[in-house]
Amino acid sequence: MPRMARSNRFEVDLRAAEALRQMPPGPALLAGIDKALGHASGLVIAPAARAIVAHRLDGFDAALRTALDRLYVDPGDRDPQCRGKLALISALDELGCGEAELFLRAARYVQMEPVWGSSQDSAPPLRIRAAQALVRLGHHGLYRLLGELLTDLVGEVRGAAAQMLGAIGGERAALLLRLRLVVGDADVDVLADYAAALLACEGAEAVPLVVPLLRHDDRAVVGGIALALGGSRLPEALDPLRALLRQTADRQLCRTLIDAIALQRSEAAAETLLGLLTDSDAEQAMAAVKGLRLYRDRPAIAARVQAEVDSRRDGRLVQAWSQAG
């Protein structure tokens, strides 16, 4: 078949597959899904898998598994960017598939593809999604797998593994996260993921391990750790944030610390922000007002903010507070 004809045929098949989600239930829908799942390209298979989930159709497990196996063969040509495999793994998980081995395979899968004269792994989202399926299953090898993913070459995967461990909780998850946090990470965003996950696992016990990172040389690390501490909403995390705010002259870091304090959502945090609104310069007062938006649903705090904003007679503060939802 000439190249142009093949291209046109592919476009027709792709449009037909993408239309499956909008089709009404019936024989035509089932036939269309069968046809798309049998296609050579993962780009056509992916919308068929999503249509199965959207319509909550039963009876396609075997076809989904067969399509998945096929896309592991010549994957660069058949399934660029792992789009088909990702959609198939997601569908199998959402439909309650209990076959751990197919998720384990995907969770360890790497697919290198050419990018600007080099190569890049296109499978990180697939590894993450497959690991999430294994969390659902409570697989016996889950901690071993997540430990492996904590050392993945891609920061996105390491961060996602940390988040999963934080959600699972327990001593084994905490031990993995403690080790990973102590070892450190060149990716500052991922380092904050480790801290947030450990705080979720251990609560106040994790604070002494996390707080020293507020003295890191990299401001981005400090900011990420501050937000992790604030987001933990642990009372023990507030004093270290307030102490650093008093000590630093870095204006950008000050704004981040104010945001972190606001995330605490506590009366003590609100008092800190109200104090900044009363006694700080215009820039910190503005950051405090924006943080206090999170407390708009607490009438007593909102009334105090309104009174202080009015007393400062700064139109920017009035506008910032009025924009609070």
Image: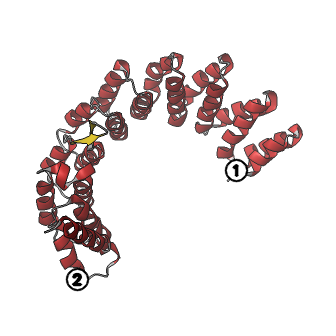
Q: Residues within 10 Å of mark 1 (few under 14, many from 20)?
A: some
| Residue type indicated by callout 1 | Ala
Q: The C terminus lies in which quarter of the figure?
A: bottom right
Task: Give the image location of residue 22, x and y in percent.
Answer: 35, 76
Q: Is 131 located above or below residue 94 in the figure?
A: above
Q: Is 250 located above or below residue 89 in the figure?
A: above
Along the line of sight, the residue nearer the viewer: 101 or 238: 101
Query: Which residue is painted at 43% across and 20% down in the image?
Result: 209
Q: Is 102 located above or below residue 190 in the figure?
A: below
> In this rendering, which labeled residue sits more in front, label 2 or label 1?
2
Q: CA distance from mark 2 to mark 1?
A: 50 Å
Element class at badge 2 = helix
Task: Give the image location of residue 224, x and y in percent.
Answer: 50, 29
Q: Please identify the quarter of the rendering in which residue 187 is found.
A: top left
Residue 298 visible to the viewer: yes
Mark 2 or 1 closer to N-term?
Answer: 2
Along the line of sight, the residue nearer the viewer: 45 or 258: 45
Along the line of sight, the residue nearer the viewer: 198 or 121: 121
Query: Which residue is painted at 64% across and 24% down in the image?
Result: 242
| Residue type indicated by callout 2 | Ala
Identify the mark at residue 142; answer none if there is no mark: none
Task: Give the image location of residue 254, x and y in percent.
Answer: 65, 26
Query: Which residue is painted at 23% across and 35% down in the image?
Result: 143
Residue 304 visible to the viewer: no
Q: Please identify the quarter of the rendering in which residue 64 is found.
A: bottom left
List the residue tagged with mark 1. Answer: 324
Element class at badge 1 = loop
